[in-house]
Image: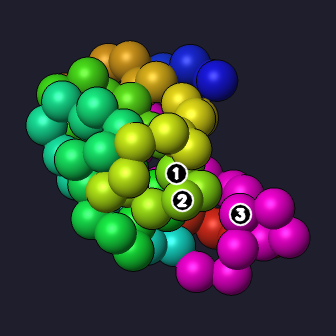
């Protein structure tokens, strides 16, 4: 996992390889992600309480399959959306 400091919405972006992570970003927000309390279709989950981004290969509503991708520091109030992601 990566530690990201001072991420600025609309200025910075997160880049992922589409051959590994798929061709569509489906982002879910939860407070206190436990690996199974997201939506079925989500492949990325942002835990707004912990400021942590996860990738979940089997859908965020099934336990297991989730990997912590990044932790954000100095980012209180951060709201990620699809425009913050780039598939390359």
Q: Taking 70 as reference, is 73 above or below it? A: above
| Residue extending furthest toward the front | 63
**Identity of the residue drawn at 56% across and 44% down:** 65
Please provide the residue range marked out in magenta: 6-24
Where disc 2 sits, the SS reads loop
The answer, for residue 13, to whether it is visible in the render is no
- Point out the image quarter for the C terminus: bottom right
Mark 3 vs mark 2, foreground winner is 2
Left or right, 23 with reference to 58: right
**Residue 7 colored in magenta in the image:** yes
Q: Are marks 2 and 1 in contact (CB under 8 Å)?
A: yes
> Where in the figure is residue 73, as x and y percent of width and height?
38, 18
Left or right, 39 with reference to 69: left
**Residue under label 3:** 21
Where disc 3 sits, the SS reads helix
**Residue under label 2:** 58
> Where in the figure is residue 22, as x and y percent of width and height?
70, 74
**Identity of the residue drawn at 81% across and 62% down:** 20
Q: CA distance from mark 3 to mark 2?
A: 12 Å
Mark 1 vs mark 3, foreground winner is 1
* Principal secondary structure, stretch drawn in magenta: loop
């Amino acid at each position: 996992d990566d530690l990201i400091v001072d991420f600025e919405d609309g200025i910075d972006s997160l880049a992922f390889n589409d051959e590994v992570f798929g061709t569509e970003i489906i982002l879910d927000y939860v407070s206190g992600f436990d690996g199974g309390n997201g939506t079925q279709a989500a492949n990325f989950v942002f835990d707004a309480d912990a400021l942590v981004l996860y990738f979940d290969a089997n859908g965020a509503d099934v336990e297991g399959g989730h990997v912590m991708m990044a932790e954000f520091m100095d980012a209180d109030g951060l709201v990620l959306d699809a425009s913050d992601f780039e598939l390359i």
